[in-house]
Image (tube, helix red, strand yellow):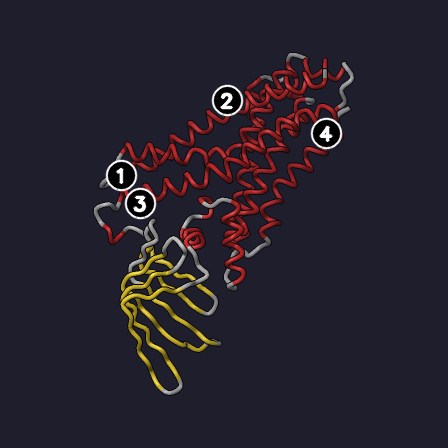
Amino acid sequence: MTSILSQYLMRTILASTAMVLVVLLALAGLFEFIAELDDTQSGYQTVQAILYTALRLPNLAFEMLPIAALIGSLLGLGALAGNSEIIVMRSAGLSVRELSGMVALSGGLLLVLTGLLGEFIGPPLDFYARNMRMEARYQQDDSRLGNDAWVKDGSTYLHLERVSPEFQFGSLYIYRFDEGRLESIAVAENSGIDDNDNWILENLRETQFQSDGVHVMQSTRSVEFFEINSDLLGSSLAKPLSLSARELLSYIDYLNRNSLDATKYETEFWFRVARTSTVLIMPILALAFVFGSLRTGGAGGRLMIGVVIGLAYYLASETLANSGQVFNLNPILVTWLPSVTLMLVTLFALSRIR
């Protein structure tokens, strides 16, 4: 009987969550599309704006799944409570702990779905969407395609004049230091990274500052190897939300090894982990509410409670994450605080159920 009830609760929660998520995505997608219409130009027109919005939906779904899980669970479990089905389950001998375990199974499935969206589906599609939009907007002006960038490789600093999606950089400036002293300056007219992560420099001119004077070296083609490969370079140019957790960890490791500030990327990584974990808590929190006054309330009341709690969690998590970067607070602390608070509220609410 327990497995049947678990499946029944799971179907109820997942169906309600899916319905809520569709509604939230429709609203978010509409607002995203309207915002993109203000930026239409050149080759970036309405069709491209629709495609961009569609490609952004998986990342938006990842961001909204905790709220959708809470509202969907409140609606689904609230309907069962309103029909006295929860009471019948308790009368059949199921404890609050057992019901919480059954509900947590739904949260576990939603957690897996959230993890897949946030790691394998959302970030690459978001990265592709942003590149597609940039190429469509500036396809008539090659000089505006790509971004300039500064990267560090140990004691060497690289200034890339223009980084295209194909990792062609235009001019490249190389500044080499030795214990704080400028050792050489080099400039290549054209540069890029090949399939083996070798840096190909064309028409390289290097000025070396030595104890016996200044020496100038030139070569039509030079092959260099830097720690920065195409993956790390792509991570440095992409927005943090367009990177998977693996790419974030790799780039954080690179920044730390080169004594660079990694706070923004550490905050995004832990924020993503905390948000994913919160999905597991939401159905259990909803269960605690349906044992109270929501048992006799209507769907409107349950919806309002879910919206208020969901918005409070969303605003608190976003505010703390951004404030942590501004005031240099511990990324783990500021990103996990809202989730831990929700977990404590859930445990307290469950402990008061008789």
Sequence-first tag of 1 and 4: 1
**Measured along the vertical axis of the image, is residue 101 above or below residue 199?**
above
Instruction: Judge depth for marks 1 and 4 and give the one in front.
Output: 1
Q: Secondary structure at mark 1?
A: loop
Q: Secondary structure at mark 4?
A: helix
Evaluate if marks 1 and 4 touch, with contact meaning CB atoms under 8 Å apart. no
Q: Position of residue 97 (x, y in %)?
A: 75, 27
Q: Identity of the amino acid at label 3?
A: Met
On the image, numbered disc 1 is attached to which residue? 44
On the image, numbered disc 2 is attached to which residue? 19
Q: Quadrant of the N terminus?
A: top right
On the image, numbered disc 4 is attached to which residue? 350
Q: Identity of the amino acid at label 4?
A: Leu
- Report the Cα–Cα distance between label 4 and label 3: 50 Å
Around disc 2, counting alpha carbons within 10 Å, would you say few (fewer than 14), some (14 to 19), or many (20 or more)? some
Around disc 3, counting alpha carbons within 10 Å, would you say few (fewer than 14), some (14 to 19), or many (20 or more)? some
Which of the 4 image quarters holds residue 253? bottom right
- Report the Cα–Cα distance between label 2 and label 4: 26 Å
On the image, numbered disc 3 is attached to which residue? 134
- Report the Cα–Cα distance between label 1 and label 3: 9 Å
**Measured along the vertical axis of the image, is residue 352 above or below residue 128?**
above
Give the camera-side residue of 266 and 327. Answer: 266
Q: Position of residue 226 (x, y in %)?
A: 43, 63
Sequence-first tag of 2 and 4: 2
Q: Secondary structure at mark 3?
A: helix
Asked if residue 151 lies left or right of residue 315, the reply is left
Q: Residue at x 64, y 37 (%)?
A: 342
Instruction: Judge depth for marks 2 and 4 and give the one in front.
Output: 2
Q: Quadrant of the C terminus?
A: top right
Around disc 1, counting alpha carbons within 10 Å, would you say few (fewer than 14), some (14 to 19), or many (20 or more)? many
Which of the 4 image quarters holds residue 294? top right
Q: Identity of the amino acid at label 1?
A: Tyr
